[in-house]
């Protein structure tokens, strides 16, 4: 088999969330690339895995590429892990994965924990489609710009956030999206795991623990919101303002409200 880079998921808190295969692979590779060697040492010691560790993190990831590719060229097999969860998911990994593929070596996924799916499946929000945003930009204007582009999207949005910014972010979300269902998944798989299922209005007014790790999940745009605010006539007019013909606007509203087209037509003609 060609030299391989294994992309290995590790737990997001609970050390028991290692898979048998991940332990097997980490025990067999020639070296392990990891973000913080001290953090990974805790996990690897727990599973009695003794392998050379190569530091591979946000600030040295480009410098390390030559060393990694030269090890693969010598026929070595390597594993890539991050401090928690799946490498590459808001963690270093993408660049070396791409380089390894482009250089003709194998890249093999060893799946496991990731906060995205762990949070999504217990949120009670629509599971698919969903969009993973990851961390929001730091600058408030960039944040608003990005979030506004998701305003009309129907899918559940998944956001990673630091505990220190959770309250500010919830306020921004409320300003951009209005009142929608929101779920805060904190400290998943850990002793103080907490899932808060509420709405943005209440969430932005609550006190939130400034410790621990958070995933924020936001309900997608639902047509119901418009329907409760606008009359049929106004909704048709609103679509027409965007350049839609009256016929298409009637069709769109009928579809969204699950009404026969003729009913929508009659309603606006009798006004
Ligand atoms: N690679 C990781 C993954 O696959 O989920 C994500 C790493 S990213 C640097 C860290 C962020 O993931 C945290 O700020 C938080 O938003 C989320 N996260 C990680 N572990 C979590 C946990 N146990 N509970 C809730 N959120 C978590």
Image: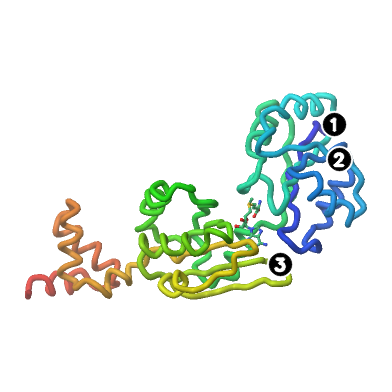
- The answer to whether 37 is drawn above or below residue 256 in the figure is above
Discs 2, 1 touching: Cβ within 8 Å? yes
Where residue 47 sits in the image (x, y, percent)? 89, 55
Taking the image as shown, residue 57 lies to the left or right of residue 127, namely right
Task: Examine the image and state in which quarter residue 147 appears.
Answer: bottom left
> Does mark 3's beta carbon lie closer than 8 Å to ligand 1?
yes
Which numbered marker is on residue 189?
A: 3
- Residue 104 visible in the displayed image: no
Q: Secondary structure at mark 2?
A: loop
Total numbered labels: 3
- Residue 194 visible in the displayed image: yes
Which numbered marker is on residue 53?
A: none
> Does mark 2's beta carbon lie closer than 8 Å to ligand 1?
no
In the rendered image, the quadrant that contains the N terminus is top right
Which numbered marker is on residue 76?
A: 1
The residue indicated by pointer 2 is 29
Q: Nearer the viewer, residue 101 or 31?
A: 31
Residue located at (16% from left, 55% from top): 241
Q: Nearer the viewer, residue 54 or 88?
A: 54
Mark closer to the chain start, 2 or 3: 2
In the rendered image, the quadrant that contains the C terminus is bottom left
Taking the image as shown, residue 263 lies to the left or right of residue 119, namely left
- Marks 1, 3: nearer the viewer: 3
Q: Mark 2 and mark 1: span between their CA atoms? A: 8 Å
Residue located at (89% from left, 43% from top): 28
């Amino acid at each position: 088999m060609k030299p391989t880079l294994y992309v290995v998921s590790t737990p997001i808190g609970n050390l028991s969330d290692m898979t048998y295969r991940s332990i097997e692979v980490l025990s067999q590779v020639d070296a392990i690339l990891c973000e913080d060697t001290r953090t990974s040492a805790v996990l690897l010691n727990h599973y009695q895995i003794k392998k050379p560790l190569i530091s591979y993190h946000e600030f040295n990831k480009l410098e390390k590429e030559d060393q990694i590719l030269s090890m693969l060229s010598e026929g070595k097999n390597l594993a890539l892990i991050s401090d928690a969860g799946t490498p590459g998911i808001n963690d270093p990994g993408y660049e070396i994965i791409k380089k390894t593929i482009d250089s003709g070596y194998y890249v093999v996924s060893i799946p496991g924990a990731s906060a995205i799916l762990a949070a999504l499946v217990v949120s009670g929000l629509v599971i698919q489609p969903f969009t993973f945003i990851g961390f929001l930009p730091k600058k408030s204007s960039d944040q608003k710009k990005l979030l506004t582009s998701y305003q009309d999207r129907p899918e559940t949005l998944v956001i990673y956030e630091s505990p220190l910014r959770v309250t500010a972010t919830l306020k921004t979300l409320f300003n951009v999206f209005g009142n929608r269902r929101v779920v805060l998944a904190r400290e998943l798989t850990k002793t103080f795991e907490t899932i808060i299922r509420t709405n943005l209005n209440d969430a932005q007014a609550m006190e939130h623990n400034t410790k621990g790790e958070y995933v924020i999940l936001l309900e997608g745009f639902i047509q119901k919101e418009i329907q409760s605010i606008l009359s049929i006539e106004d909704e048709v007019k609103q679509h027409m303002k965007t350049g839609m013909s009256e016929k298409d606007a009637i069709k769109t509203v009928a579809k969204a409200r699950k009404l026969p087209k003729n009913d929508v037509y009659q309603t606006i003609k009798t006004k």
